Image (cartoon, coloured by chain):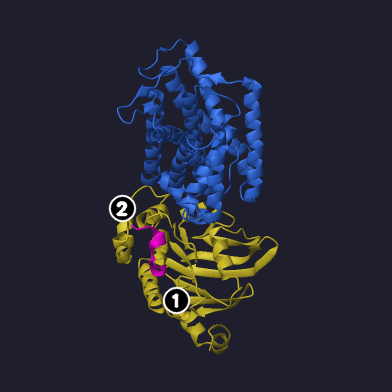
Chain colours: A blue, B yellow
Amino acid sequence: MDFTSRIFQLALYGIVSGSIITLGAIGLSLTYGILKFANFAHGDVMATGAFLALIFLNLFQRLALPSSPFHPLSFGLPLVLAFILCMVATGGVAIGIDSALYKRLRGTRSITLLIASVGVAFILRNVLQFIWGPDPRYYIKKIQVSVRLPILGLRIKHDQVFIIIVAACLVIFLHFFLTRTRMGKAMRATSDNMDLAKVSGIDTEKVIKWTWVIGSALAAAGAVLAGIDNKFITPSFGWDMLLPIFAAVILGGIGSPYGAMLGGMVIGLSSEISTAFIATSYKPAVAFIIMVVMLLIKPRGLLGEK
Amino acid sequence: MIVLNVENIIAGYGETEILHGVSCKVEKKEIVTIIGPNGAGKSTLMKAILGLLKPTQGKIFFSNKDITGKNPNQIVQEGICYVPQSDNVFPSLTVEENLEMGAFIRRDGFREKINEVYQIFPDLKEKRKVKAKKLSGGQRQMVAMGRALMLDPALLLLDEPSAGLAPRLVQTIFNKIIQINEKEVSILMVEQNARRALEISHRGYVLAMGHNRFEGSGEDILSNEEIGKLYLGE
């Protein structure tokens, strides 16, 4: 494989990991926009979603649901159903955490909320570790062979195509939700100015709940897609995702969901492409460097408002 | 008929008491202006009426109903809408989306109402797909007022509607206020531009240091020599 096709090959992988990062980044950006705090538990909420999917997956396998894979994908109905249900369930978990903790801290300084979220992160991760242990758990046992595309000799797995398509659909769905529905517009309004939203008669508590549900459901979706890409999940994977997610959000402009999409793609692409030049183990450092550079030259981010 | 009746309210921010027992009334179809020097408590009074601040003492009645201590979204539902002095539009939303947010709790007749608002502010109709952050100061003020009218309020609270506007726009905004009032919306406003505001008001209050100083018809206040010297800059 010559150098050009190698770069394009890495860019293709970059789109796959960018899709996953984007889904995580959107939730972080949405909650920041509305509640004005950086939710350090977001990565662990993702991991929680991944393990909730594992619960559903095991359940469906035990129920003897038709489990033959959807050709040419390497998984079948149980994982697809688990994927959908875990989005709902993770939204529920997020509402639970909000009413148990964050709601009581409403109106306090954002640093208080941030520290509380670090606590939530520890709790979630340790609960996952307590139940499932630190070893990887597998969604898919089969090995999938990648197929060759007719251009530049690029290779991709069908599962990865699935990941890109599902992420794109979710992002488009979010766009229509934010621009076409009453609640979506109210979310953007509340993110712009919560006091004005209140005096316009918008029920901001309801808006906050919706924000948690949507952000966390998308995070769970990202986590399951990551699990499909890697075949396995671990309790600490959410924490590892946090750095690229933060980098994506800061790059795109914190509080802007569209910035999160852009940032997610840029971080995914640049991390993967960097491996053509530097050792793979430096991949996380690339996201970190982009984040630091962005904070130095344009702290508001590419699409940031304030 | 009395629309709003504020009785001796005491309110402030945390430990700092700003209003030391202020009263005022707005009758149906009236335009009432509150004037007074900076720090008199004018904006605080507005916030207390809307429930953004909870008065520690005193009562606020709206159409004979006690609304003291209620939350802003409940008070908006009762029929009081408020236009803050600054940050009074949603910058990343389009003009039409801003108006839609004004009607958030209203499920019916949204289209008709939005057309009514466009009749009062024809400029906004042309700009309806434009994001509010791209508008001029005068246009933003119109969006803010339009948003507040979306719920057919019985009472409109305006905090410094002419603040920061070019002189020729100030008259436009005051004309719009008269036009809104002709649609049977009572208006309570706070204004730095005291003379212009009192000219279009039925009655006015002078507030100083968190106390009522004077009240009377717009003309009474304008012709009162002492008030003229102290508060109207003559």
Say which residue label 1 marks: B201
- Do the numbered discs 1 and 2 sit on residues whose CB atoms are within 8 Å? no
Q: Which residue is mark 2?
A: B111
Residue B136 falls inside the magenta stretch: yes
Q: Tell me which segment is drawn in magenta.
A: B130-139
CA gap between label 1 and label 2 equals: 31 Å
- Secondary structure beneath dot 1 equals loop
Q: Is residue A44 visible?
A: no
Tell how many labels: 2
Instruction: State whether residue B107 is above or below residue B135.
Output: above
Name the foreground residue: B26 vs A140: A140
Q: Residue at x 55, y 70 (%)?
A: B24
Disc 2 element = helix
- The picture places residue B87, in percent across and down from the top left corner, at 49, 62
Vertical arrangement, residue B56 with respect to residue A229, above or below: below
Q: State left or right for residue A254 relative to residue A6.
A: right
